[in-house]
Amino acid sequence: MRALLVVAHPLEASFAKAAAARIRATLERRGFEVDLIDLYADDFDPRLTAVERASYFTTPYDARAVADYVARLQRADRLVFVFPQWWFNMPAILKGFFDRVLVPGVAFDHAPGGGLIPRLTHVEAIWVVTSTGAPWWATQLYMGDPVRRQISRGVKAFVNRKARFRMLTLHDMDRMTEARAGAFLGRLERAFREF
């Protein structure tokens, strides 16, 4: 099995990087081939280019500028995204990854008459690991859990509607303790034994 692990955080000593390392180690112990994309380390440009946007409704879509990422996405059986939530959303660099890599001819095709046809139907699971400075009630009740909705209803539909989805969120990062962070990393390890 191949897992594509995409992490989006600019700091090496971040909780997101620690979570990604724990996930990678857990999956590799289980025999997974893990392909790690660190968007900040790669200096990934999140900006959709004029050429990319102009080709959005043409065949074939021009994905030459991100061809390596496209190939890595297409090889994956399972997807994992690890990132913090800033302003109740994903970092811009990850949004740009979705904009530039999950594109027509790669993640989906435009259906005649409107809609889309998923192309990555071999992807069995999409899991999200995230953290937020807000308490759970602010993220879920007040804001309506926008990241969960965007990925579970949006991204998943473009990839494979039948893929298993799970989101693990560490809330209240602004008041984090070492004990709580460690407990969450342990929870991740247990969860990814079942991935």
Image (cartoon, helix red, strand yellow):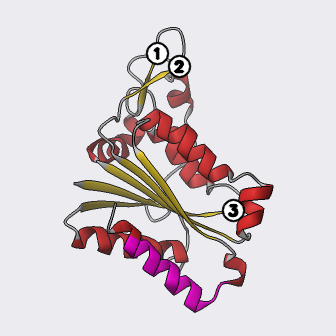
Of 184 and 21, which appears nearest the observer? Answer: 184
Q: Is residue 43 above or below residue 59?
A: below
Check disc 1 and report the residue beneath it. 111
In the image, what residue type sits under mark 3?
Trp
Check disc 3 and report the residue beneath it. 86
Rendered residue at 57%/91% (across/down): 178
Q: Per the image, is 30 magenta?
A: no
CA gap between label 1 and label 3 equals 34 Å
Q: Is residue 22 above or below residue 128?
A: below
CA gap between label 3 and label 2 equals 30 Å
Q: Per the image, is 188 magenta?
A: yes
Q: Are marks 3 and 2 in contact (CB under 8 Å)?
A: no
- Residue 129 locus on image (x, y percent): 51, 63
Residue 104 falls in which quadrant of the image?
Answer: top left
Circle 1 residues within 10 Å: few <14, some 14–19, many ≥20 = few
Outermost residue on the left side: it is: 31
The prevailing secondary structure element of the residues shown in magenta is helix
Q: Are marks 1 and 2 in contact (CB under 8 Å)?
A: yes
Pointer 1 or 3: first along the chain? 3
Of 64 and 127, which appears nearest the observer? Answer: 127
> Which segment did they paint magenta?
176-190
Tag in front: 3 or 2: 2
Quadrant containing the N terminus is bottom left
Check disc 2 and report the residue beneath it. 115
CA gap between label 1 and label 2 equals 5 Å
